[in-house]
Image: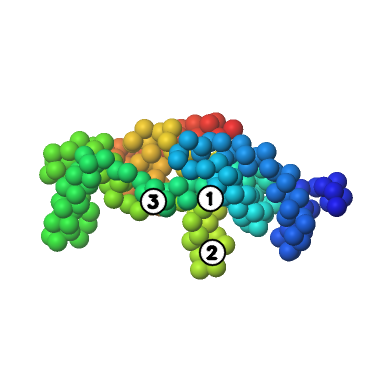
Amino acid sequence: MTYAKYESTEKLIQLAQAGDKEAMEILVMENDALIRFVVRKFTGRGKEYEDLYQLGRIGLVRAVQNFDAHFDVRFSTYAVPVIMGEIRRFLRDDHPIHISRTIRENAKKTMDFLNDYSQNHDFSPSIEEICKNTSLNRDEVLLALESSKPVKSLFEPIDKDKKLLIQDVIGENPYEEVEKNLLVESLLNTLDEKERALITMRYFDHLTQARVAEILGLTQVQVSRLEKKLLLRLRKNAV
């Protein structure tokens, strides 16, 4: 059976999702160069190339199984972050993320203050209050707070059927078409601490612009303008 017989990648995917093993094999074969391209980005991390390649193939299969034509993106565009996510999960689970001693100490100092504060107040303190009581600057506090959060993958399921992923709901906002195509895990690394904190609070913690403004010491208008500017920059970087 040849690729041409299926007429299109979309048809191949439909057949593979229906259980056609040969269609799945052809998809994996036709995307072998894509898998190897992604795998090369993770070489030199103490893992055998062949092991990473097999994880890449697993990621490709997952991409086929979960792809939906309504995503309005090419399959290869969708497959890349899925393959990367499969490899990153393995590397993350095999090698826990290292957090520097200074950040750990700042995180402990910050959490100790927050725990004491919560015993006497029904609301959270502002960043300025935390800075004042911990002798840390704003960036140190934001980094300490972020380091205390559990790491989440863009591909982590959020429903009991494990069919809806974090990446599927990021776009539920006025900039849906922008966010839907973002390779979030890599693109966030292009932002500075305040910018990353804003995006994290808005699209992962689901805070309102007003609450983000309060935490960052900005006005809601400033947050709105900065948010739009960041999303446009991320969209440009994602192309």
Q: Nearer the viewer, residue 147 or 199?
A: 147
In the figure, is residue 79 to the left or right of 219?
right
Disc 1 target residue: 86
Residue at the spot x=41%, y=42% of the render?
Answer: 199
Quadrant of the rendered image containing residue 230: top left
Instruction: Tell me how many marks there are.
Output: 3
Between the C-alphas of marks 1 and 3, the distance is 15 Å
In the figure, is residue 101 to the left or right of 17?
left
Residue at the spot x=61%, y=36% of the render?
Answer: 37
User: Residue 187 location, x and y as percent?
Assistant: 48, 37
User: Residue 110 location, x and y as percent?
Assistant: 19, 48
Whether residue 142 can be seen here: no
In this view, the mark in front (1 or 2): 1
Residue at the spot x=57%, y=62% of the render?
Answer: 163
Disc 2 target residue: 162
User: Residue 129 location, x and y as percent?
Assistant: 17, 44
Residue at the spot x=68%, y=42% of the render?
Answer: 32
